[in-house]
Amino acid sequence: MIPTITLMRFFASLLFFIVFSHLPLQANTPLLVNGLREEYKAKMELWTQSMQATATAEAQQKMWSQRPDAALYATKLWAALKPQLAQDWTIEPCSWLLKLVCSFPAEGTAPEALEMRKEIILQILASVERQHLRSAKLAPMCLGLVAVRDSLALKLLERIEKENPDRSVQGVAALAIATYLQDLSEDPENMKRRLTLIRKAIIESAHVEIDGITVAKIADDQLYVIRYLTKNRVAPDLAGIDETGLAGKLSDCAGKVVVLMFWNSAVSEYERVLEIQRNLVKKMAGKPFVLIGVTNDSLASLRAMKAEGVVTWRNFLDPKGELARQYRVQSLPFCYVLDHERKIQYVGNPGSFVELTADALLLDVK
């Protein structure tokens, strides 16, 4: 059952968009852009909750066909934003658009949507560099650039940190750079640079709020990751209740290689993700290995997936996202691979690297 507040938010955003879509375009483009964003977010929230509440694989398949089309909304937003990229008001919605197009799944996205994504990224980066590099409104864009995850975006962030005259913008750029560096390496020099950048973000921008979250909170999460969730750190002893009602902890798996996967049935490429995990569980059968999932899907949905063989591993229920927050998970699906001493050896997306890491770690288990 969908919560009443979600339905109210959806219909309110839809009404907002309908009203303003009939006003003159040029004068009301900011209103139209905001209406599109709110409509998409409301539809996604409604769809996600419906998806997680489904009780059979057949119902899930049907719901997947009703998923809001991110590429369609990106196309509409880009049509409204592209002619006005020189305007300061476009900075914040463009940062949101970057996050949206960078969330397109790696497989199954139409070639024209991928071309549009490339165009959006390149033109927004060029606009920031040429027209907004010194803007005091650039803070949201700094975190939007993190989603791009390439060298061009990183170089632009480094320019913003050095050249933007607003110290709070510099601080947010520093935090974004530190987030980028998280994926590069964990050598001492890189760690030292990350800590220096995070310190600058806290000093200059702790009060800045982006998408309802303060820079202080984001920086604190980064420090937590460095202290507790990087390679060779002993993973926090996550504890939860599984789909059978039994309590469990990571420490129960002492002496085994563990893949800890955070997921739900609304993730991109859902079927492929679950197929990869089923194959991994099958391959590792009889070995000192365990896959533990953490999901905010409903209990009924999870039990149905188990009964139908779609899910073949144990899962801890996380309806409020508390376990995901403990591990500072920002997007789904997301994996940690732990060795037999519960030390973290891999952090990232599910796939071949998870399997390769687990295979290598099993050689050290006696």
Image: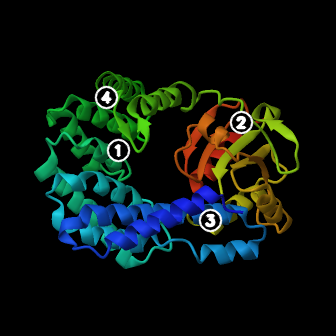
Mark 1 or 2, which is nearer the eye? 1
The answer to whether residue 217 is above or below residue 286 is above
Mark 3 or 1, which is nearer the eye? 1
Do residues under tags 3 and 1 come within 8 Å of each other at their CB atoms? no
Q: Residues within 10 Å of mark 1 (few under 14, many from 20)?
A: many
Q: Is residue 106 left or right of residue 304?
A: left
Residue labelled with disc 3: 270
Q: Amino acid at mark 4?
A: Ser
* Residue nearest the viewer, comparing 102 with 203: 203
Q: Residues within 10 Å of mark 2 (few under 14, many from 20)?
A: few
Residue labelled with disc 4: 205
Query: How far apart, in angstroms, are the residues tagged by discs 3 and 2?
Result: 32 Å
Query: How far apart, in angstroms, are the residues tagged by discs 4 and 3?
Result: 37 Å
> Residue at point 66% right, 48% down?
261
Q: Earlier in the sequence, mark 1 or mark 4?
A: 1
Q: Earlier in the sequence, mark 4 or mark 3?
A: 4
